[in-house]
Amino acid sequence: GENVEQHPSTLSVQEGDSAVIKCTYSDSASNYFPWYKQELGKRPQLIIDIRSNVGEKKDQRIAVTLNKTAKHFSLHITETQPEDSAVYFCAASPSGGSNYKLTFGKGTLLTVNP
Amino acid sequence: GAVVSQHPSRVICKSGTSVKIECRSLDFQATTMFWYRQFPKQSLMLMATSNEGSKATYEQGVEKDKFLINHASLTLSTLTVTSAHPEDSSFYICSARGRWGGSTTDTQYFGPGTRLTVL
């Protein structure tokens, strides 16, 4: 089955700095890669996703890059703000069909210091 | 759009009792629903996948007789923890994958979770 590794497990940055979280996956059949943000005690919220036919996707301060050859994808947050503090999870899945299910990384606790 | 509700948000029960958790998609048809378990400071562990009108598919190591899943309609799935014990205490979260305009999306929308404490 799929295995998703996520690094780092914790990340502390100063407000205004950039944050980068990296994930690798093992199953070459995976072609859908979402990122979720989870605040303490709350539900995971989708913040951005990318599919394998695209190398990069950006939404305001958030961007995701995908290198399908190397089987890794990364989340980039620019101009970080204290409200960005949360746990971020990457995930991978084959898209569609009966094989679809998300395999999650172990999460990164991001702390943005004012 | 794409709201998933979950009920109850918290439940405390005695050891040996059964607890039912409901997961509803409020504004879309959920072709597939997923049940996860999350321990403190850990990731989401998929327990099972359920498609409307068919039996759930359980992940390896998850006891199907312990965690009963029913997906009777396109907007409702239930998870029943039978004969609960303290080690079943956890945060249970459902998610739903929906259908819009005749096609199913890859996006999973999560419920707010249920905190189960078994005494």
Image: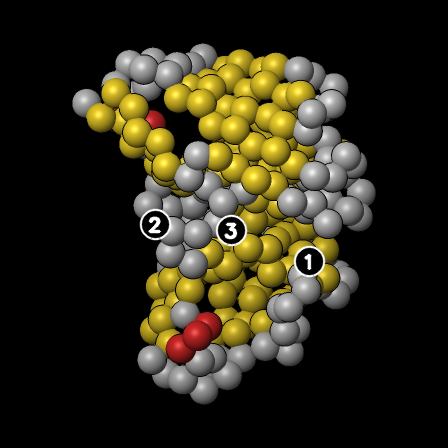
Q: Between B47 and A76, which is closer to the camera in this rendering?
A: A76
Q: Quadrant of residue B48?
A: bottom right
Residue that label 2 marks: A41
Q: Is residue A60 left or right of residue A80?
A: right
Residue that label 3 marks: B44
Quadrant where the C terminus of chain A sits is top left
Disc 1 to disc 3, C-alpha distance = 17 Å
Circle 2 residues within 10 Å: few <14, some 14–19, many ≥20: few
The amino acid type found where label 3 is placed reads: Leu
Q: Between B73 and B39, which is closer to the camera in this rendering?
A: B39
- Percent coordinates x, y for residue A94 in the rendering: 74, 38
Residue that label 1 marks: B50
Q: Share a chain, discs 3 and 2?
A: no
Disc 2 to disc 1, C-alpha distance = 24 Å
Q: Is residue B103 above or below residue A51?
A: below
Q: Secondary structure at mark 3?
A: strand
In this rendering, does residue B9 appear at all?
A: yes
Q: Secondary structure at mark 1?
A: strand
Circle 3 residues within 10 Å: few <14, some 14–19, many ≥20: many
Circle 1 residues within 10 Å: few <14, some 14–19, many ≥20: many
- Percent coordinates x, y for residue B25 in the rendering: 56, 48
